[in-house]
Structure formats: structure tokens, C-alpha cells
Image (cartoon, helix red, strand yellow):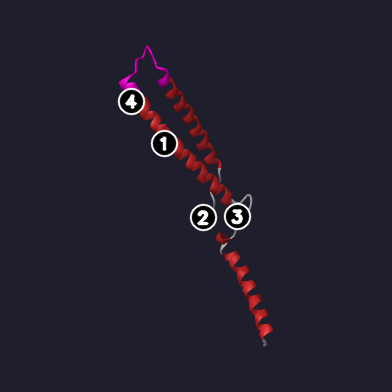
Amino acid sequence: MDDEEEAAERARLSADNDSAMSDIEPRTRLPVSGSSCEHCIEKVRLESELFKSRVKLEGLLKLIKTMEQDYYNPVDDSEEYKTYCAEYKAIETELEKLRGKRNLIPICVELN
């Protein structure tokens, strides 16, 4: 074989090898629209939001408990206390919605 034929053969083998490798290693391919990888990304985003909401809830719950122990008077609820309780309930409701969304997302089977 002369040099041009050898170069052409190497290029063909390289192209065949690249094609075969893309079938073997799907992780190297870019995700396509509607793929399960998008579901994984959305699930991770929701998990992050859930975590942030739980942290807010813990902080508010501590504050509410402190107010109940130190300052609570059943006859005269302060506006601050009512505001914290309302905010707590709103975040708790949002957390439940996020959990529902997270549970609807299919689990990715290509996690290799």
C-alpha cells in the first residue's frame, strides 16, 4: 500500500472506531431533548429547592418555638408571631407541592 491508501484506511478505521465507541459509551453523548437526563437534572433541581425549603422551615420553627416559650400570650398574639406562623405554613405548603412534582419525575435508567 502506498501512503495515500494507508492514510485512507486509517481514517476509515478511525471513523468506524468512533462510531462503535459512541454506541458503547452513551455517557459521552450530549443529552437530547426529552431524554431521561433532563429528568435527572430536574429532579436534582427540585431536591435542591426541597433542601432550601426544609432549612427555612427549621429556622422558622425554632423562632416560633422560642417566641412561644418566651413571649407567647394567648390573649394578645403579636403581629410578628402571626407573620412567622403564616410564612411557616406557606413554605410548608410549597414544600408539599415540590415533593409532589419530584415524585412525578421518572427515575433515569441510564445512571452509569
Q: Residues within 10 Å of mark 1 (few under 14, many from 20)?
A: few
- Marks 1 and 2 sit apart, C-alpha to C-alpha, by 28 Å
**Disc 2 element:** loop
Q: Residue furthest bottom?
A: 1
Q: Is residue 9 above or below residue 42?
A: below
| Marked residue nearer the N-terminal end (1 or 2) | 1
| Alpha carbon distance from label 2 to label 3 | 13 Å
Q: Indicate which label's residue lies in the foreground, 1 or 3.
A: 1
Q: Secondary structure at mark 1?
A: helix
Look at 43% across and 24% down and name the residue there. 84
Q: CA distance from mark 1 to mark 3?
A: 32 Å
- With respect to residue 49, does 72 lie above or below? above
Give the magenta part as a residue range.
67-81
Q: Residue at x 65, y 80 (%)?
A: 7
User: Is residue 78 part of the magenta span, yes or no?
Assistant: yes
Query: Which residue, given by chain and number where applicable, does mark 1 sit on?
Result: 55
C-beta proximity under 8 Å, tags 4 and 1:
no
**Under tag 4, what secondary structure?**
helix
Q: Position of residue 29 (x, y in %)?
A: 59, 60
Task: Say which label, 2 or 3, has the lower sequence index.
Answer: 3
| Structural distance between the alpha carbons of marks 4 and 2 | 44 Å
Identified by mark 2, the residue type is Leu
Judging by the rendered image, the residue that carries numbered circle 4 is 66
